């Protein structure tokens, strides 16, 4: 029966269909789940063909998008990470709208300057920090999976495990990455025209000369590729950064397994290194807190698009994974006195509501402070000193991630239950699984909305106008991303699941380990230890 679970588990993290009533037994009764899978693991050839065909249907596509990523050995609370991805996507869309509106054909420039003084506009511009959440969640998933694999292998990560982890990550990003590259380069520029429609080609300027780095997810590492109004598929840098950081994750996981102290020390160094690197770039390029200042021409090239400016994301994600496994160990202890003895800090946070809420409020305070901090300097970028600008760029992104991690910690320790339920809904998962496409698609939607004849030659930037364009952009991006996911990316994903995933997935290993750890303890016989034989 364990073998049946192993054979069926290759659908795993990619599949994500909703749990039925029977499937929910898996989470609580391993023996029942093994029996259930064993009964249905030997379909006839006709049934197999029917299942393959049905796997490409729109119904199955919806099940894939709306379903949980969690497997029997995962806690369903991890679904909140999809909610994090959803809000990350929304924030990135808001920031993209703000930049496009600021640089489009504005009738009244004085009105633009007036808008920059508004608190809400400062919040919109600061929404670019949402991308840091995307990187944090991605590293959390990778570190969590590596930890599970090492537990199943008694602390080992074999060379083949590294290759499987890397190839699996590549296959998750590749369909969206290459599909959108083709569409954006070959299709979008020919769809329409307008006064500034030539901007649709501007981020593909160097593709005819230098496309090899982009092909291998390395375009963001080439300085010329990340200059504004140049590059080849420049706005795919979030996926490139995600792939590059994924290469580092298994090595850090090994350090953590050898020594928690060494792992946590290394991650603290990562965080402070991130602060120092960002401050260095701020001094070097004279970056300003006010996002629309001319010196911030180099902001994307210097700070936002590089993996070495995301080390704080890596640090907080690994520390959070380490804490999460401590929480899982805490839950396995039944007696309250033993919990208090073995995990005194976690026990207090779990049992003291005010302490959990204090951590939650602290995290929210860090997030909202980052949202509103730039209000004054957006209107007057020159008012900040060079040191003040450096402090902002050094601390803003790490503190944002710290706030995000504190909110997540509060949820994992049993607080903020309403947010946990809200972040785990089907709608959150649908958008979250479209983030890879949506992150790249935003530029195409922005070009269609702001560069073509569909937009007036001049826009009067009143607050209602900005709100209308902003909401329209966000909704268009989400809808188009889901449509492309269902019609184009999902078939490729299904082919990968059917033909490649069985060979690169660790789920058979994790299923076998899960079955062993969940086997009920052998109960002593009534005659055992008795004189009656």
Image: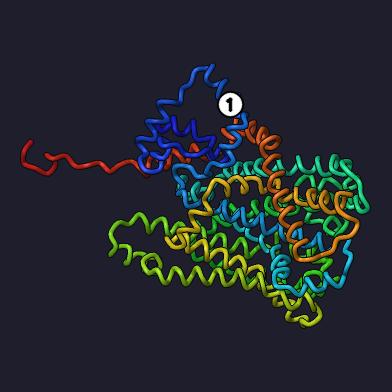
Position of 321 compared to 461: left or right?
left
Q: Is residue 441 above or below residue 121?
A: above
Viewer-closest of 183 and 463: 463
Position of 110 compared to 308: left or right?
right
Residue 148 on image: x %, y %: 49, 48
Residue 106 on image: x %, y %: 87, 64
Viewer-closest of 261 and 108: 108
Give the quarter of the image for residue 348: bottom left
Residue 412 on image: x %, y %: 46, 59
**In terms of secondary structure, where does tag 1 sit?**
helix
Viewer-closest of 77 and 457: 457
What residue lies at 35% left-to-right and 36% top-to-bottom? 31
**Residue position for label 1:** 54
User: If the image is split into quadrants, where does the C terminus sit?
Assistant: top left
User: If the image is split into quadrants, where does the N terminus sit?
Assistant: top left
What residue lies at 66% left-to-right and 40% top-to-bottom? 171
Residue 402 visible: yes
What residue lies at 45% left-to-right and 59% top-to-bottom? 417
Viewer-closest of 304 and 105: 105
Position of 253 compared to 370: left or right?
left
Residue 73 on image: x %, y %: 44, 44
Position of 298 compared to 250: left or right?
right
What residue lies at 47% left-to-right and 72% top-to-bottom? 358
Q: Is residue 32 above or below residue 352?
A: above
Give the quarter of the image for residue 518: top left
Give the quarter of the image for residue 225: bottom right
Residue 206 visible: no
Pointer 1: residues within 10 angstroms few (<14), some, or many (20+)?
few
Model colouring: rainbow
How many labels, in total? 1
Q: Is residue 382 above or below residue 75?
A: below
């Amino acid at each position: 029966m364990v073998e049946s679970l192993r054979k069926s588990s290759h659908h795993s993290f990619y599949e994500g269909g909703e749990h039925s009533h029977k499937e929910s037994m898996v989470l609580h009764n391993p023996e029942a789940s093994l029996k259930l899978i064993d009964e249905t693991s030997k379909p006839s050839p006709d049934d197999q063909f029917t299942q393959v065909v049905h796997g490409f249907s729109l119904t199955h596509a919806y099940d894939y998008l709306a379903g949980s990523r969690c497997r029997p050995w995962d806690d369903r609370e991890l679904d909140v990470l999809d909610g994090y991805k959803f809000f990350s996507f929304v924030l990135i869309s808001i920031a993209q709208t703000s930049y496009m509106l600021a640089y489009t054909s504005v009738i009244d420039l004085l009105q633009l300057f007036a808008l920059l003084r508004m608190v809400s506009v400062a919040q919109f511009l600061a929404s670019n920090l949402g991308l840091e959440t995307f990187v944090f969640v991605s590293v959390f998933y990778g570190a969590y999976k590596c930890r599970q694999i090492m537990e199943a292998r008694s602390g080992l990560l074999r060379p083949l495990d590294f290759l499987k982890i890397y190839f699996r990550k590549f296959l998750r990003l590749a369909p969206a990455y290459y599909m959108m590259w083709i569409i954006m380069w070959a299709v979008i520029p020919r769809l329409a025209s307008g006064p500034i429609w030539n901007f649709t080609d501007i981020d593909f300027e160097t593709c005819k000369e230098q496309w090899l780095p982009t092909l291998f997810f390395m375009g963001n590492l080439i300085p010329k590729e990340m200059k504004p109004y140049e590059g080849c598929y420049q706005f795919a840098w979030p996926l490139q950064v995600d792939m590059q950081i994924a290469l580092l994750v298994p090595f850090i996981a090994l350090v953590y397994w050898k020594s928690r102290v060494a792992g946590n020390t290394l991650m603290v160094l990562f965080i402070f290194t991130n602060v120092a690197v960002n401050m260095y770039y701020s001094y070097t390029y004279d970056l300003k807190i006010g996002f629309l200042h001319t010196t911030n021409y180099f902001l994307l090239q210097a700070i936002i698009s590089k993996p070495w400016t995301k080390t704080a994301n890596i640090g907080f994600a690994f520390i959070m994974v380490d804490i999460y496994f401590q929480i899982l160990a805490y839950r396995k202890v039944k007696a309250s006195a033993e919990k208090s003895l073995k995990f005194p800090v976690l026990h207090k946070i779990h049992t003291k509501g005010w302490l959990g809420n204090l951590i939650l409020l602290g995290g929210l305070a860090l997030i909202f402070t980052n949202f509103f901090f730039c209000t004054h300097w957006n209107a007057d970028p020159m008012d900040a000193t060079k040191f003040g600008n450096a402090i902002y760029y050094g601390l803003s992104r790490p503190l944002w991630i710290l706030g995000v991690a504190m909110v997540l910690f509060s949820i994992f320790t049993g607080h903020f239950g309403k947010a946990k339920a809200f972040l785990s809904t089907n709608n959150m998962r649908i958008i979250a699984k479209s983030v890879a496409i949506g992150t790249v698609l935003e530029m195409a939607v922005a070009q269609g909305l702001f560069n073509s004849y569909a937009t007036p030659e001049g826009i009067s930037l009143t607050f209602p106008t900005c709100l209308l364009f902003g909401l329209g952009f966000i909704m268009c991006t989400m809808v188009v991303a889901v449509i492309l996911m269902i019609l184009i990316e999902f078939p490729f994903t299904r082919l990968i699941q059917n033909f490649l995933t069985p060979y690169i997935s660790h789920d058979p290993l994790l299923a076998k380990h899960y079955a062993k750890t969940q086997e009920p303890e052998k109960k002593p016989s009534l005659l055992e230890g008795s004189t009656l034989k």
